Image (cartoon, helix red, strand yellow):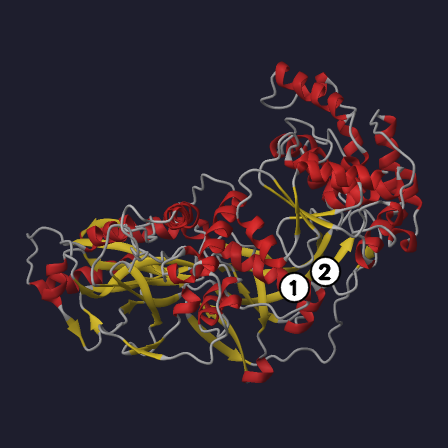
Amino acid sequence: MTTPDLFAADTKPAEFARLTELRRVLHEHAHRYYVLDAPVIPDAEYDRLFQELQAIEVKHPQWMTPDSPTQRVGGKVLDGLSPVRHAVPMLSIETETDTTAQGAQDFDARVRKALGLQEFDLPVEYAAELKFDGLAINLRYEHGVLVQAATRGDGETGEDVTQNVRTIGQIPLRLNGCDAPVLEVRGEIYMRRDDFEALNEKQREKGDKTFINPRNTAAGAIRQLDPNLVAQRQLSFFAYGLGEVRGWSLPSTHAQMLDALQAMGLPVCAERSVAHGAAGLTAFHEAIRAKRDALPFDIDGVVYKVNALALQQQLGFKTREPRWAVAHKYPAQEMLTRLNDIEIQVGRTGKLTPVAKLEPVFVGGTTVSNATLHNLFEMRKKNVRVGDRVIVRRAGDVIPEVVGRFDPVAVGEDAVMAGNELVVSPAKARDPYVRNFRMPKKCPVCNSDVVREKGEANHRCTGGLFCSAQRKQAMLHFAQRRAVDVDGLGDKLVDQLVDGGVVKTVPDLYRLGLTALASLERMADKSAQNIVDALEKSKQTTLPRFIFGLGIRHVGEATAKALARHFGKLDAIMDASQEQLLQVSDVGPIVAQSIHTFFQQTHNREVVEQLRACGLRWEEGDPSPAAQLPLVGKTFVLTGTLPTLSREQAKEMLEAAGAKVAGSVSKKTDYLVAGEEAGSKLAKAGELGVAVIDEAGLQALLGSAAG
């Protein structure tokens, strides 16, 4: 199904032609972003094109089609999941639990025997892939358009999860170059480890329940009744097979079939190979084992399939498993060990993380002796204390974590893991009294106060620039382009400077000389001079940039500008009470507490004075209380190209007058400032009755406000 051709070639409205072009362009950019990981336009430009398409479809609902990029947006909450009968059953494959090379050799021997091959015959050709740890899914495309997505279920009947699957950016709503009446694509919906960790970190910040592992999180998300919740989980997809096929000529091998699916725009994992015989399978198994931890997603093994589809048909099935495929497992990545102690680690942003000191245990391909416990409240939920036997998980390059306590009282036995086997021994209960762990009141690194803001789960060091554990991140933040802008001061150089003891605080950067810089490894004289020059240039900055560069928690660029406008001088900000800070627009109770706490620390004030002594300068003015700013309380949105002002210049002028500049039009918008090629924001403003002005109107408004 495609965009309906409702018009003769010479009578198509310009808007319809634009709609068709927008859909083509957005599909292309979505594929580059989600599948190829190689975007060629910024997110803001994609959003602009998307909103333009939305505006046309709202205006002409009769032009809406299921394969439009706008249909990825979550829809209404479902009443329930409807059953779907699979045209071709989704069968499981046999699992080879022998994690050594013998597992591959045994499978090859079974295949050769079933094919009647002798020792002198050529090796069998296999397609070797990864065994993803996610949720199997069947995608039904009719004439190239996604019309249904269903879970595996019991293999015969699954559940309709089409609305949820539409929210997954990697899954194309329309296939490239395929108009087959029916093509069912099978694959795995999974969650990347970084997306899983980010989701759990958000949960911890809110004090909500964290998720157990990526697989369960992905599977649970797909069966949600609210597609909007699914969209928030950041799920991914890999294709690996076919279901029902009508009107499409199958290639001769499985590997060629995967190549064809990839050409259609479907994501297919690059970690695949054509292997020959048992030796080839063993080499693939070992190669993936070596890089398993570096993969961005979880796997629990690899899959071998006879490559030739004709041989697959010849081998057939035994009960409900194909004879031509097997899953070759890897060792478990969860083990049991003893928690010997709990120490505190101070992160780059001041977060205090309790770290479990463990009896060393081999898990996930390496020996683990430390694991994160995340925060105090997470520990309390898991009921973990020193001396307990705990479950430790390690997956890839994600920091090992303590999943929970193994409770021998509950099961009547103590246990240890040996490979995949649970070996039991006589029970040993927890001692009658084990002291609960408490977070320190002082930072163990710099002795600054430790605080936990209201509603937050994490404890943080208030040391800021003074705390050595936060130095590198503090320096990089201070030197970034949007702060004081020290060109050339990047991660590697900061690592060298801090690790080598050359600098300890941000002011030390401005005391660097050519000799110290030139003595660093791989630092040429010219490069050293460039850094010195960049540091000198950065001394001339602005008050908002300097405030932002200090790295005060919750203080972004907008808040820094609001503080500078309101107080005029840095000393006034440093001496302000929480009540005075609350009078600033864009500052609430949490931000006010954070700013006040930061400047109450003597060492933070000393760092500021040292920076002043090093020559950092900025213009200061008279206080401008928010109530006196002419456009305070007004919200503006900028769109299109203005004749003489850049978007940033217009934004700065509005913010200087106390206005808030938002990114999208809503009922709360007071004015839309529109230039050429205004796009969908202009249409949205018209729908909502928002006042629209051009650059001349903006200048007149600013002049009137100033007067």
> Residue 245 location in percent, x, y?
19, 64
Asked whether residue 550 is in view, the answer is no
Asked if marks 1 and 2 touch (Cβ < 8 Å), the reply is yes
Q: Is residue 474 above or below residue 317?
A: above
- Depth check: 414 or 19 in front? 19
The residue carrying mark 2 is 458
Q: Identify which residue is drawn at 78% across, 25% down.
A: 539
Tell me the residue that label 1 is attached to: 204
At label 1, the amino acid type is: Arg
Total marks in image: 2
Which residue does the image show at 79% across and 64% down from the upper left? 454
Q: Nearer the viewer, residue 224 or 259?
A: 224
- SS of the residue under disc 1: helix
Using the image, determine if residue 298 lies above or below residue 492.
below
The picture places residue 204, in percent across and down from the top left corner, at: 65, 64
- Going 81% across and 40% down the picture, which residue do you hit? 704
Provide residue 288's location: percent of width, then percent of height.
35, 51
User: Looking at the figure, which quarter contains the C terminus?
Assistant: top right
| Of callouts 1 and 2, the N-terminal one | 1
Q: Residue at x 66, y 71 (%)?
A: 384
| Structural distance between the alpha carbons of marks 1 and 2 | 8 Å
Dot 2: what SS?
loop
